[in-house]
Amino acid sequence: MCVGNSYSIKWMLSFSISTITTHLWESNYTDYQQYLFTRICVYKEGFLTPIGYRKISKIFNEEGLKTPRGSIFKNNHVHSIYKKGNIREERMKREDILEVSQPNIELIK
């Protein structure tokens, strides 16, 4: 005994999904590099009048801090850490890009 239709209709639905994200990899910043970047940000952004790179390098040298490579701080080191840290922060906070193609529906005979 046959219940329902004696034939079947088959459909195929196809589409593609593409995503671009920066959340799949770990940061290669050390704790010390993150500490230096955070301190520099406080001096550059946390005050009513930002402190210059030369003054920040002087403060770090007086505290006995060294660059990540072990040198004494100069203004160019502070500028480089601040600039590259901001680029890194921007990249880490970037929104994901998700693209879905138009669906394609086909009748399979």
Image (cartoon, grey):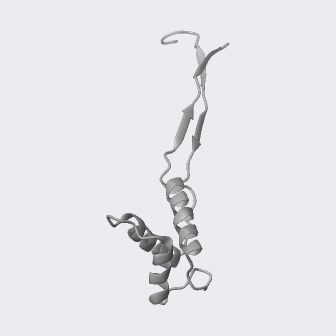
Q: Can I make out residue 18 in this image?
A: yes
Residue at (57% x, 85% y) in the render? 72
- In the rendered image, the residue lying farthest to the right is 109
- Left or right: 27 with respect to 39? right
Q: In which quarter of the image is residue 18?
A: top right
Q: Is residue 106 above or below residue 64?
A: above
Residue at (54% x, 85% y) in the render? 66
Residue at (55% x, 81% y) in the render? 73
Q: Where is residue 5 in the image (x, y as percent from the top left)?
A: 52, 9
- Left or right: 36 with respect to 72? left
Q: Can I make out residue 23 in this image?
A: no
The answer to which of 22 and 51 lies nearer the viewer is: 51
The answer to which of 96 and 50 lies nearer the viewer is: 50
Residue at (52% x, 66% y) in the render? 82
Q: Position of residue 60 (x, y in %)?
A: 47, 83
Q: Quadrant of the C terminus?
A: top right
Q: Position of residue 79 (x, y in %)?
A: 55, 68
Q: Position of residue 31 (x, y in %)?
A: 49, 76
The answer to which of 2 and 9 lies nearer the viewer is: 9
Q: Is residue 2 above or below residue 49?
A: above
